[in-house]
Amino acid sequence: MNNFIKDVTEQSESLKEGMKSFASDETLKDLNSLKSMGFNKILFTGMGSSNFCSIPAKNFLVKNGLDAKVESASQILYYEKNLITKDTLLIMISQSGESVEIVKLIKELPEDIYVVGVTNDKNSTLGKRAQICVLLNVDEEESVTTRTYLSSIMAANLIGKALIRDLNDADVSDLKTAANSLRDFTDKWTSIKSALIEFIPHPSYLCLIGRGDALTTARAGALFVREVSKFPALDFDSGEFRHGPFEMVDENFAGFIFAQDSNTWDLDLFLAKDAASRGGKIVFVTDKEVEASENFLPLLIDKIDPLLSPILQIVPVQLYADQLARDRGFEPGKFRWNTKITTIG
């Protein structure tokens, strides 16, 4: 077992340990104070997976009538600082708390901007600037981001819910249920990985497709494949995929479609089977039972809180990326040109 697979299989226990901090009574109390502060806009920002992890929380807030947005720290820093006004709650997510765009943006923030920081280091630039610091408190990975991404999803989940209603024991229970489902899923990692390798042995490229809360997995999953295996991976919104990219589908096409139980599940299933009928190899990661067919491989995950479902969806991508790296002669997850903390913008 290499360091990357070790990180993947230990994610559940790391999350449970991290919950002692980011889901502690003290943190929940701090977060419960937010909804009374009268923010008119909610802005989530980060870079890479620290940006994508907020999509489910943003969706939840929009569904509940709040003006919420997810935007990269780079885009805000150089083009959209006007998004940040006195009535904006700025939620900044950076595992290190020292990503170059986060640090530069903090330096340009007026003092009266209220910041919730999600980070693994309370003494980082982000940790010190935040009025509320949600500390992830998970061990650093040996390779690219794994458990810190999952814990960031959980933290964003709590922040989003706290802006609508008081957090309570049931919310913490949902996190624990997700962590237990993750443990059960990763316990089967060898059989999952073998099935994926047999189904898509040598892809030319890989597409990751999702919508709604699952868009998180499409975005972050493609990033992980590119980082872990230095392999071309493209991410798409499921609806947008119909508008042109579907023309890519033929016998050389390979993709993951992430479809949790929602009002668009039937659309996602139709997209998957349509692509498979045209020769594409489709891995369908879902929390509803569906039968396999030619070119169509369903992977069933537990049905948990929809905002947390991306925690399970990402596992097959992590496992497949490991094999892609091995096949290409790379140590899975080991950086060649970058470091875990990006200091060059």
Image: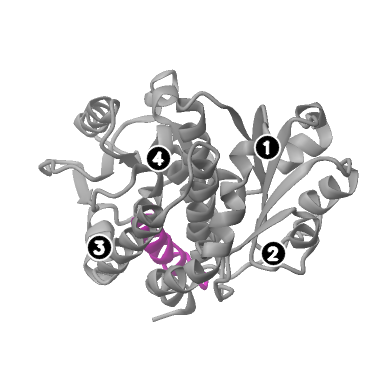
Q: Residues within 10 Å of mark 2 (few under 14, many from 20)?
A: many
Give the residue at mark 1: 37
Instruction: Give the vertical position of 122 relative to 2 (above or below).
Output: above
Label 2–label 1 contact, CB within 8 A: no
| Residue sitting at x 40%, y 74% | 13
Q: Residues within 10 Å of mark 3 (few under 14, many from 20)?
A: some
| Residue sitting at x 50%, y 36% | 164
Give the residue at mark 2: 96
Q: How many marks?
A: 4
Residue 42: x percent and y percent?
64, 34
Label 3 or label 1, whichever lies nearer to me, is 1
User: In what element is the residue under mark 4?
Assistant: helix
Label 1–label 4 contact, CB within 8 A: no
Magenta residues, start to end = 314-331
Q: What secondary structure prevails in the magenta region? A: helix
Q: Residues within 10 Å of mark 1 (few under 14, many from 20)?
A: few
Residue 327: x percent and y percent?
41, 66
